[in-house]
Amino acid sequence: MLIFFALAAEVYGQNQPDNIAFEFKQIQKGDNSSDTLLGRAYYFDESLHLHVHHPVNQISYVDGGSMKVYYPYSNRGYHMSSDTPFDLPIVNSLIASLKDDYGLAAIGFKVRSNSTSGDTLITQWEHASGSENGVFEVYHSGNVIVKARFEAQSISLETELDGHKTIDGHAIPTKISTSHQNQRSSTHEKLYFDEISVNPDIPDSVRNFAFPENAEIETRQF
């Protein structure tokens, strides 16, 4: 399963913008829970600056194996370090969708088969080490990815990408819906993107995010 969570970190290529900024709304529903987040995100240099405005005021900055989380109202925060890169929330599927192969070749997957359904091309991908690591299906309609499915022994995940807009030559989805199921639970996520900018100027306070000098910071090592 590390393969899936590494996906966005390994998505590179000429089809991907260097930087992207957007407003977002995230709705997550589990078996017994429902949460909504509103905020703004900047993805740049494979790093992520995420400012959540609702339901709390929280700033997160993820750069490889470093994650900073800051709460302005209480002037408190956390600085977490890991030997492996942290996952990039909110932006994962968006960045993956901008790569023709959904970033799969870069993490060891290879094409197993191709088929068509109407005007949709369906490409099935299997990991080089065998299907025990799961199988991806990527659905292309025209020049955009409209769906991706992942199946493994105890997990299934399906992502649908809708409402594409062409911005500076990049076809970018404005709605991404993901359903994740395993033997114990299921979750459903909807992401809505607005005010999307491709390769914008990144404010210095975002690019070089730092805690205020008087903030109370707790450090954690993973």
Image: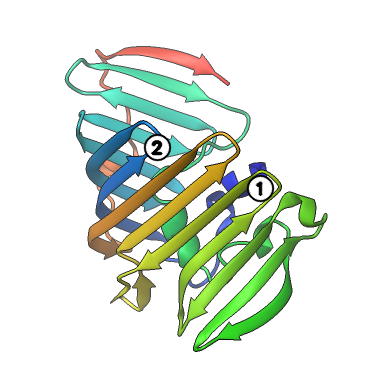
Query: Where residue 178 appears, x then y in whole percent?
Result: 43, 53
Residue 163 shows up from this direction: yes
Q: Amino acid at mark 2?
A: Gly
SS class, disc 1: helix
Callout 2 crowding tier (Cα within 10 Å): few <14, some 14–19, many ≥20: some
- Work out whether 29 lies above or below 105: above
Marks 1 and 2 close (CB-CB < 8 Å)? no
Q: Amino acid at mark 1?
A: Ile
Query: Where residue 209 appears, x then y in whole percent?
Result: 32, 34
Viewer-proximal residue among 58 and 189: 189
Q: Which residue is mark 1?
A: 3
SS class, disc 2: loop
Q: Where's the N terminus, which quadrant?
A: top right
- The tag on residue 30 is 2
Residue at the spot 64% in from the left edge and 82% down from the top edge: 115
Residue at the spot 43% in from the left edge and 37% down from the top edge: 62
Q: Is residue 33 left or right of residue 131?
A: left
Spatial separation of the CA atoms under disc 1 and disc 2:
23 Å
Residue 45 shows up from this direction: no
- Work out whether 174 lies above or below 100: above
Quadrant housing residue 176: bottom left
